[in-house]
Image (cartoon, rainbow, N blue to C red):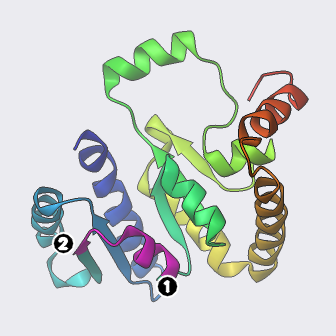
Amino acid sequence: SGEYRRLTPVFLDSVQLLRERGYPVQGVIPAIDRKAHHWITELLGGYGDSLPVRVVEGQSRTVLRAADLALLASGTATLEALLLDRPMVVAYRFSWMTYQVLRRLVKIRLFSLPNLLAGEALVPEFVQRAANAENCAAALQTWMDRPDKRAALRERFGQLRAELGRCAGGQAVQVVAQILERHDGSV
């Protein structure tokens, strides 16, 4: 629930910014359960009728498959988006205390699964304060305005899927280890 509470307002504000800039976007949010559905629907009510966002319970894969673009919290949904060939923007906000601890203990350059697997920044990712509506909306705008970038991303995603496909039979751990080794363990 913390993830929903920290990121849903950012995601809704991102959609609102895009609408204000003239992009005819529509959003669909797959709520994980009835409680999340209710909370998101209440939050959405604060935007009035100006925000074309629909909330559905569950169905995250169906929603992602139908999407042209995805604005996602970091996690396994980003891997699903890669597998479904969806351009994405990834955001994450930790609780203040968790972030204070993690920023002292963990030094990472990339955090989303597609970027970690590629060893490079394929998709925009924003963490903590940078995970705001302005940054997310701008990154989504780039995907919308640049079909050449979307095509290049899909090609790279295809390469990653092929590499993952060769990982059958318990070899996935070895491939991930090789990817990390290629980058001196610094992801």
Q: Quadrant of residue 19?
A: bottom left
Residue 148: horizontal and vertical position, in percent?
Answer: 82, 79
**Total tally of numbered discs in the picture:** 2
The answer to whether residue 144 is left or right of residue 126 is: right
Residue 135 appears in the rendering: no
Specify whether residue 114 is painted magenta.
no
Residue span colored magenta? 56-65
The answer to whether residue 61 is left or right of residue 3 is: right
Q: Quadrant of residue 147?
A: bottom right
**Residue found 58% across the figure and 65% down from its top:** 81
If the image is split into quadrants, where does the N terminus sit? Answer: top left
**Mark 1 Cα shell of 10 Å, populated few (<14), some (14-19), many (≥20):** few
Counting residues from the start of the chain, the first of labels 2 and 1 encountered is 1
Toward the viewer: 15 or 167? 167
**Residue found 48% across the figure and 73% down from its top:** 64
Toward the viewer: 10 or 177? 177
The answer to whether residue 31 is left or right of residue 129 is: left
Toward the viewer: 146 or 117? 117
**Residue 158 position (above or below residue 98):** below
- The mark found on residue 47 in the picture is 2
Residue 172: horizontal and vertical position, in percent?
Answer: 73, 42
The kind of secondary structure the magenta stretch mainly shows is helix
The span from disc 2 to disc 1 (Cα, nearest Å) is: 17 Å
Residue at the extreme right: 182
- The mark found on residue 110 in the picture is none
**Residue 15 position (above or below residue 122):** below
Q: Quadrant of residue 101?
A: top left
**Secondary structure under the numbered disc 2 in the rendered image:** loop
Amino acid at circle 1: Tyr
